[in-house]
Image (spheres, helix red, strand yellow):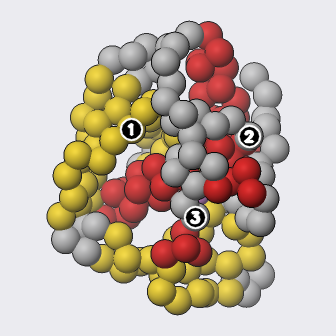
Amino acid sequence: MAKRNIIKYGDPFLRKISKPVENYDGKLHQLLEDMEETLHAVGGLGLAAPQVGVLKRVCIVEYDDKLYELVNPVLIRSRGKCVDNEGCLSVPGFRGLVERPEEIDVEYFDRFGNLCKQHAEGYFARVFLHEMDHLDGILFPDKMIKKIIDDD
Ligand code: CO
């Protein structure tokens, strides 16, 4: 396992569209494990592969002490709207208020290629959507309605 560097806001790499995963192999597992090590080292609720320099449709979410590995995730359904603040490991220094759906259903594959479905609400849904946006080169400042400067 190895911790990987996180690419920061301003680098055009973060704007690229990630490609679907085709092989559920050791290379994918290594990527997921490196992403998990990186997330645990820096702290945060999620991380997407393009943030560590890999243009694959892979992201991880850690919420309520449970880790979700999402490969080729797709938003199936969304309902409602809510505004809350979010930040990003690639965007240090500020957070922002972003409007997102209140409830979602997502389909994705696990590291072995098994189809998974997940319903998520509130901030849990927000984290999924934030990470999935990274796979399309979208960062939260693109969507924020108010910037919040960190005091520390
Ligand atoms: Co992010």
Name the residue: 68% across, 78% down.
94
The quarter of the image holding the N terminus is: top right
**Disc 3 element:** loop
Alpha carbon of mark 1 to alpha carbon of mark 2: how far?
18 Å
Residue type marked 2: Gly
Ligand 1 rendered quadrant: bottom right
Left or right? Give the position of 60 relative to 16: left
If you read the primary sequence from the N terminus, does the residue marked by circle 3 or circle 2 appear first? Answer: 2
Q: Residue at x 72, y 42 (%)?
A: 52
Name the residue rendered at 39%, 62% in the picture: 126
Q: Is residue 48 above or below residue 71?
A: below
Task: Estimate how packed mark 1 is, as few (under 14), some (14 to 19) or many (20 or more) residues with alpha carbons within 10 Å.
Answer: many
Q: Is residue 71 above or below residue 41?
A: above
**Residue for badge 3:** 139
- Residue 112 lies, in percent from the top left, at 43, 14
Residue 71, quarter of picture = top left
- The label shown at residue 73 is 1
Residue placed under numbered mark 2 in the picture: 53
First in residue order: circle 1 vs circle 2: 2
At numbered mark 2, what does the secondary structure look like: helix, strand or loop?
Answer: loop
Q: Which residue does the image show at 46% across and 49% down from the upper left?
A: 132
| Amino acid at circle 3 | Leu
